[in-house]
Image (cartoon, rainbow, N blue to C red):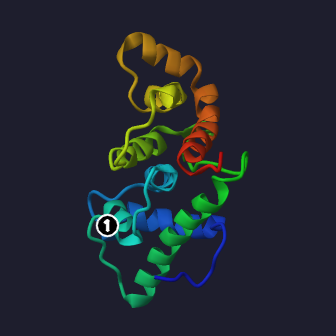
Amino acid sequence: MHPDHTGKLTQPELLRLESFLRSGASGDDAMSLSHAHGFLTAIVSGPEDFEADEWIRLIFDEPVFDDSEQAQDILGLIVRLHAGIAQALPITGRYSPIFEFHQAANAERSYGSEEWCKGYISAMALWSMPLPRSLGKSLDPLFLIANPQGQAQYALRCEHYDELCALLPTMAETIYQHWHGKT
């Protein structure tokens, strides 16, 4: 599968991909865009290379495309999303996760990183080698956001949510550098 275009996805392309992932055509258990972005980040960051067919089937839940043109478009977008992550992670400060945006009734916008974190964690489960203990602390924001254990952790997450989210790009870059860095 070779996408027609390369480079970072545009906002309209991201919205088109998100719309398909949220539609019934992608299947009941398809990932959201944010979940898929976290998942792909861990796929790129991890200790081994996965073939596109392996991770595509995990993102979509037996998608039903209108025609071959739509299939090529949507699958090309997800391949480009993966490629964009692979291009950004090696360059410190270039990677940026895609979080879900929420529109409140008062027109205030906020974001949620829980789905991104859950996606990252689900791909970590596919890694053939565990992350060394020395890097375990770097995962604290990930697990605290995705699954706070107990009231104290939940309160900490709520109080420091923005700060925890801001640590996720550095975490992803650190994990990537561990497995793929030339040190």
Residue drawn at x 44%, y 61% is 49
Q: Name the outermost residue toward the top.
A: 152
Quadrant in which the C terminus appears: top right
Instruction: Tell me the quadrant of the picture where the N terminus can be found.
Output: bottom left
Q: Is residue 58 left or right of residue 81?
A: left
Q: Based on the displayed image, in which of its 4 quarters is residue 64 positioned? A: bottom left
Q: Picture coordinates of residue 22 (x, y %)? A: 39, 60
Callout 1 crowding tier (Cα within 10 Å): few <14, some 14–19, many ≥20: few
Would residue 89 appear left or right of 144 to someone viewing this image? right
Q: Is residue 46 above or below residue 30?
A: above
Residue type at mark 1? Arg
Residue at point 26%, 70% (across, down): 62
Who is closer to the viewer here, 36 or 49?
49
According to the picture, the residue beneath numbered tag 1 turns out to be 57
Instruction: Identify whether 65 is placed above or below 161.
Output: below
Q: Quadrant of residue 106?
A: top right
Q: Position of residue 2 (x, y in %)?
A: 51, 83
Classify residue 108 as left or right of residue 22: right
Q: Position of residue 130 (x, y in %)?
A: 38, 38
